[in-house]
Image (cartoon, rainbow, N blue to C red):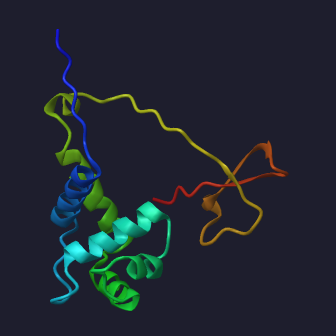
């Protein structure tokens, strides 16, 4: 039996992610220069480089000012509950019919990050476990 190999390039992944987000985020162009495509390019670049929006805008030739990107995101970004619902629906739409027929087993890898400060918003953000790195408190945001 022949095995089927398929390689995805970085451009394939970018186009897939951009198309999925454009469809599911229900964003619209913020202005003639501040299009959804440009916003996603800045966000993807910042994510890939693990840098700020300012740094991403500075690196990209087609990018807007960092303030324009922040203004657009402030206007277009839905509240957390709506965002979570849209993402869950978009992922569910991509599942094959076979996976939807019955419940599936799921494995989650939890990495606990030692935390020595106070919770940001809720006490549930801090998880207690066996001592590691001099603390029994760990950051584990489970609010969503």
117, above or below 133, in the image: below
Residue situated furthest right in the rendering: 134
Residue visible at 28% across and 53% down in the picture: 88
Residue 75 at x, y = what percent? 29, 85
Residue 99 position within the rendered picture, expressed as x and y whole percent measured from the top left: 22, 31
Between residues 106 and 47, which one lies in front from this camera angle?
47
Q: Quadrant of residue 96?
A: top left
> Could you tell me residue 36's position as x and y percent?
21, 75
Of the 4 image quadrants, the one containing the C terminus is: bottom left
Q: Quadrant of residue 19?
A: bottom left
Image quadrant in which the N terminus is located: top left
Number of on-image labels = 0
Where residue 34 sits: x, y (%)?
23, 85
Is residue 70 positioned above or below 94 on the image?
below
Residue drawn where x is 35% and y is 77% of the image: 60
Q: Residue at x 47, y 78 (%)?
A: 55
- Judge left or right: residue 116 versus residue 51: right
- Left or right side of 25 for 108: right
Q: Nearer the viewer, residue 95 or 19?
A: 19
In this view, the residue farthest toward the top is 1
Q: Nearer the viewer, residue 47 or 79?
A: 47
């Amino acid at each position: 039996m022949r095995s089927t190999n398929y390689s995805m390039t970085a451009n394939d992944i970018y186009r897939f992610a951009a198309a999925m987000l454009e469809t599911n985020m229900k964003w619209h162009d913020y202005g003639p220069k501040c299009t959804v495509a440009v916003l996603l390019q800045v966000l993807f670049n910042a994510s890939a480089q693990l840098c700020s929006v300012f740094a991403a805008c500075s690196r990209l030739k087609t990018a807007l000012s960092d303030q324009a990107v922040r203004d657009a995101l402030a206007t277009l970004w839905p509240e957390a509950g709506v965002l979570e619902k849209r993402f869950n629906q978009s992922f569910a739409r991509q599942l094959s019919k076979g996976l939807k027929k019955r419940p599936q087993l799921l494995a989650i890898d939890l990495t606990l990050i030692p935390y020595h400060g106070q919770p940001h918003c809720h006490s549930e953000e801090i998880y207690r476990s066996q001592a590691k790195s001099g603390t029994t408190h760990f950051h584990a945001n489970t609010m969503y």
